[in-house]
Amino acid sequence: MQWYKGITWGGVVSMLLLLGACTGKPENVEPIQNFELDNYLGEWYEIARLPHPFEEGLSHVTAQYSPRDDGGISVINRGYKAESGEWEQAEGKAYFVDAPNVGHLKVSFFGPFYASYVIFTLDDSYDYAMVTGPDKDYLWILSRTPTLPDETVDALVSQAAQKGYATGDLIYVDQKNRPQE
């Protein structure tokens, strides 16, 4: 294997910094403290998200979190693609970046590559949450139920806007009339 020929130390350092940035957090966004994983496990419905190619055209999106034997978290994201009439699914794994009582995880769906998963808003009853990635291009509003009251969604969107997210670009996910699986 000679893939390393021509790679400088500067290139290696740049790659390491880039990978480290993938588990970082956006400016002025802090993960929740006193996080309780057992309360977070289970199914979450995607209420709104910023657009990304990996979720393009998906409705009825859910995320299922369960414990892994290695101490991590199993992640199964599912969504319905009306264009093809089929369900799509991605399986991944997540691990805490810092302490297990801090809502900052790293998640991987593609081999050794991890991205940040920062829970920065979480209802006391774990009924809804806001999650971001390593920068403000990523935002998800999640709920334990397929819908949230409009006033709750409005308050979450307002909070995200105050933190600098492009909330005008949010996609509100259709969770009604769930297709057969």
Image (tube, grey):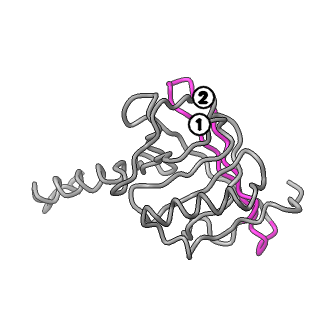
Q: Position of residue 55 (x, y in %)?
A: 61, 65
Tags 1 and 2 in contact by the CB under 8 Å rule?
A: yes
Residue drawn 35% across and 55% down? 28
Mark 2 lies on residue: 67
* Numbered circle sitting on residue 74: 1
Say whether residue 82 is magenta: yes
- Quadrant occupied by the C terminus: bottom right
Q: Which residues are magenta?
A: 59-85
**In the picture provided, is 39 more to the left or to the right than 21?**
right
Mark linked to residue 180: none
- What secondary structure predominates along the stretch shown in magenta? strand
Taking the spot 15% from the left edge, 59% from the top edge, the residue there is 5
Distance between the Cα atoms at labels 1 and 2? Answer: 6 Å
Task: Name the spot of residue 39 as percent of width and height, x first.
Answer: 63, 30
Horizontally, residue 131 falls left or right of residue 141, namely left
Q: Which SS class for mark 2? A: strand
Closer to the N terminus: mark 1 or mark 2?
Answer: 2
Q: Furthest residue to the left? A: 9
Q: Residues within 10 Å of mark 1 (few under 14, many from 20)?
A: some
Q: Position of residue 71 (x, y in %)?
A: 50, 25
- Which residue is depicted at the point 55% across and 28% down? 36
